[in-house]
Image: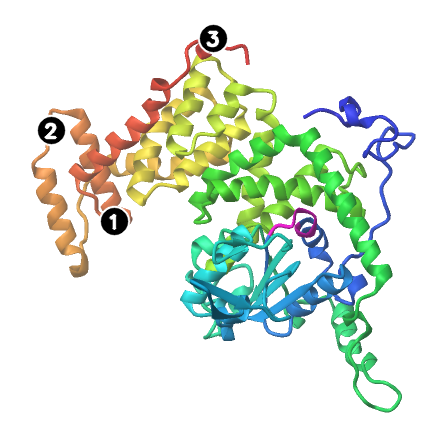
Amino acid sequence: MRDASSHPGSAAGTDQPATSATGRPPALARRALLEALGLHGLAQLDAAVLAALATESPMLLIGPHGSAKSALLERLAAALGLEHRHYNASLLSFDDLVGFPVPDGDGLRYLRTPATLWGAQSVFLDEISRCRPEVQNKLFSIVHEKRVQGIALPELRFRWAAMNPPPSLDDADAADGMDRFSDYAGSMPLDAALADRFGFVLPLPGLDELPSEARRAVIRSGLASIDGTGAAHPPAQASRNDAAGAELTSLIDACREGARLCAALHGPWITAWVAALVAPLRQAGLGISGRRAAMLAANTAAVHGARRVLGIVDATGDPLSEVAVADAALSALRHSLPQRAQGLRVNPGVIATIHRQAAQAATQARTDVALARILEEIDPVRRVGRALSALARRPGRVPRATMSALVSDAFASQSTQGRWIFAQELLPALVELDAVDAATLELLADSFSAQVAFEQRGELSHSVPRSRFAGFESLVRCLETLDSRDPAQVALGNLGAALYARDDGAAEPALLASQQAAIRARLAAADDDQPRGEAHDAG
């Protein structure tokens, strides 16, 4: 990643702001996007919303009833002066979108009305998770292609939707808080393909999740809607405000310029970061498609541009620093995963950990092609195999922190039996190479030590409860078939017995042998596809 000063666009008069005496672009005053539209307690969404507007990427809001989903989208459309359509997808028929079909010669034409989709610049599909599957399928082309019935909608720019949280497909103790709202019986998970078409997926908090001052501001807004006669009237923000619209348009234009600058300056880092996310996201049950990976790269540049325009900077105060880009990347990741719409939970702690590891990998890989190739390997065990090969050729080739993360990820991806085998295969080499930190060694040593302790027991009598007797008999029958003169078979037999004694599940030696062979093959395969000449790379 180049310094801002090395980029051709850093000269005066370009889209890069003037620098301060320290050589850094001056930090802008923090600007509130949604607060200016009368929406309280949503400042954490400012950058993502502005990025979605700048990229014109489809945006989906998920939140409980009364969380300002409709207000947010309606006020954006009003501020921008858009030709806007708002449909309740749960009540929608296709004729509502295209008009009533009437005969026209040998074909049909649609009677257009002010409520049909033709000529719209923005469309809001409310309650999209409650519409019938056949209607949802017809909405797909609108969201994805800006087409209806195969006919292009050239004026359509913004495609927005909103829904209540769907029932969780995960455990009830989900960690992102949305499980508290899973009692919306009519809100169903979106089809995975439709969910994947929304570039930004934003969770909105309920009233009880807002900071106290924001909560009071929401409550006070009800009083502000009462005039002197005691009659209620719509809040002022609901009508278009020309000044607010001009300000928002200016922010969108500046965000686009910022996104282009970010892509030019930090494109290689963003690419490496997204590539490093693929495997750990899949392991966490949050796998992304190629389309989503490309969206995530674009979203990161756009969110960075939005944060810079809005005056959101990192601790260094430099909006073009690598730290600022990493912060934008985390924000983009949090607001770009479609799984929430599918009833899958997104754990913020897991996301932060995955991002941190990917960011470290991207920083290391941007000047190290060989390391980048290791980190981009999808299979976690093969990834460890590649790293081991590199370490065997040149000690220290893979940083200790990186190797520790790779081994921990691969260990976590295995079944209980697989983890014992993985530790047995890997621990001696890791100790010899001094390649991982103490915490990772302890992780592997737990199962390894348990097997050694089992083999060193003076007597091997074991109390078997009635509920586990069938499994014990199966294990004994398998042990009787092993050749005691073959060290490999003896080791597998001891492993199966140790697993049983540890109450981690009995594993038949034949099954363990199969798992061992598979793990060994994946570790060894790293050398088979190693490019020629890499064995002597200089790093």
What amino acid type is highlighted by mark number 3?
His
What is the spatial separation of the Cα atoms under label 2 and label 3, in whole angstroms?
A: 43 Å
Q: Which residue is mark 2?
A: 484
Residue 481: where, in percent of width, then height?
7, 36
Q: Quadrant of the C terminus?
A: top right
Residue 348: where, in percent of width, then height?
57, 53
Q: Which residue is mark 3?
A: 536
Q: Quadrant of the N terminus?
A: top right
| Position of 445 relative to 209 (above/below) | above
Residue 388: where, in percent of width, then height?
42, 22
> Who's the residue at 43% across and 58% down the image?
191
Q: Residues within 10 Å of mark 1 (few under 14, many from 20)?
A: some
SS majority, magenta: helix
Q: Considering only order in the chain, which callout, 1 or 2, is on the residue closer to the N terminus?
A: 2
Stretch of the chain drawn in magenta = 52-57
Quadrant in the picture for residue 214: bottom right
| Disc number for residue 505 | 1
Callout in the foreground (3, 1): 3
Q: Is residue 436 magenta?
A: no
Badge 1 marks a residue whose secondary structure is: loop
Q: Is residue 56 magenta?
A: yes
> Who's the residue at 80% across and 81% down the image?
225
Q: Residues within 10 Å of mark 3 (few under 14, many from 20)?
A: few
Q: Considering only order in the chain, which callout, 1 or 3, is on the residue closer to the N terminus?
A: 1
| Position of 455 relative to 6 (above/below) | below
Residue 391: where, in percent of width, then height?
46, 18
Q: Residues within 10 Å of mark 2 (few under 14, many from 20)?
A: few
